[in-house]
Image: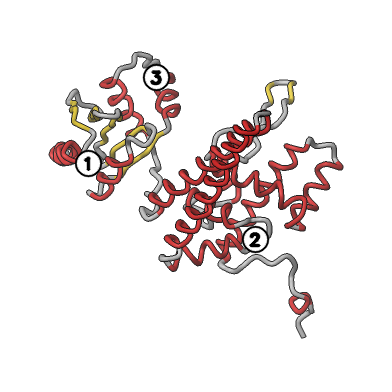
Amino acid sequence: MAKRITICAGIDTGKHKLDVAVDGSSEQLRVDNAARGHQALVEWLKCRKVKRVGIEASGGYEQAVVAELRRKRFVVALFQPKQVRAYGTFHLLLAKNDKIDAALIAMCTAAVKTVHPAPDPRLQPFAEHLTMIDQITEDIARLKNRLESCRDTRIQGIWKAQIALLAKSKRAELKALLAAIRKHPDLAARLDLIYSVAGCGLPTAVAVLVRMPEIGNITRERASALSGLAPYDDDSGKRSGARHIEGGRERLRWALYNAALAASSRWNPQLKALYGRLIAAGKPHKCALVACARKLLVTINAVVARGTPWMAEVPQLAKLPAV
């Protein structure tokens, strides 16, 4: 029997141009990173019977072409830059330019055994909106730092006015984002399940919903790894290093960490108990908070998978033995 081969292509993304290469072929293409260029790219790929396309994340410049390729039924593998570079280093392919990168991405795409399904396209505009809200929060924090070190009353007034304006804008944008999400009944139901967990406020619930579309459909270990809250060993020979977290989705991790900061001291009895046990065992404050953030996410994942709201305690009736 003839072995079926999936023809793969790789795209190196630039702000203005896209460089494309087909794995196992010397053919290459350069098109504009614009609607007309995307149309020419799709036709070129179809002529060569390409089924799978790999592309490197590039600060958002890849989003439009990824959306177009998925609309045209191509399987798209989205790589982080360090994944492609690590693959090239392993194969001793150290030269770098746009054409070489496109060919390397094509090789990497062909080597991938499993391509994760595309995320819900409805979440993309929500993610951009949420990022803007996060950026407003960061601007407020910067202005508060300036205010703290400022002694001039006139300048203090300017900073305070800008902080108040940004805080008002943040509230309005969060309200608008929630209204947009609630137009979709399935997303609204999932948001309510996440929000039911004690210590998970609305901003955190929105962050989990938008930044982790896989919530409820993955294992607790996978959820921890995707959020960057999974502890990794650092041992070698007789040396036993401290476990540490690494990678993951940074904005989601910060949202969970900030939620755990309040939840472990006030709102969630399970996290309060966990934090107390870890501190009593001699763990540092931040280490205990990371563990609480991980526990919070694991709980959310279980609640969404189960499809019923979170409860702090099992009802007394449920504890009675069956007659």
Q: Residue 322 vs residue 215: left or right?
A: right
The residue indicated by pointer 1 is 2
Circle 3 — which element? loop
The residue indicated by pointer 3 is 91
Q: Residue 13 vs residue 165: left or right?
A: left
Q: Residue 115 vs residue 163: left or right?
A: left
Marks 2 and 1 sit apart, C-alpha to C-alpha, by 53 Å
Nearest to the observer: residue 52 or residue 299: 299
Image colouring: secondary structure
The residue indicated by pointer 2 is 197
Marks 2 and 3 sit apart, C-alpha to C-alpha, by 46 Å
Circle 1 — which element? loop
The reply to whether residue 226 is visible in this rendering is no
Three-letter residue code for mark 2 = Val
Rendered position, 233 above or below 305: above
The reply to whether residue 265 is visible in this rendering is yes
- Disc 3 + disc 1, Cβ < 8 Å: no
Q: Earlier in the sequence, mark 2 or mark 3?
A: 3
Three-letter residue code for mark 1 = Ala
Decide: few, some or many residues near mark 3? Use Cα within 10 Å; few <14, some 14-19, many ≥20.
few
Q: Residue 262 vs residue 176: left or right?
A: right
Rendered position, 283 above or below 216: above
Q: Earlier in the sequence, mark 3 or mark 1?
A: 1
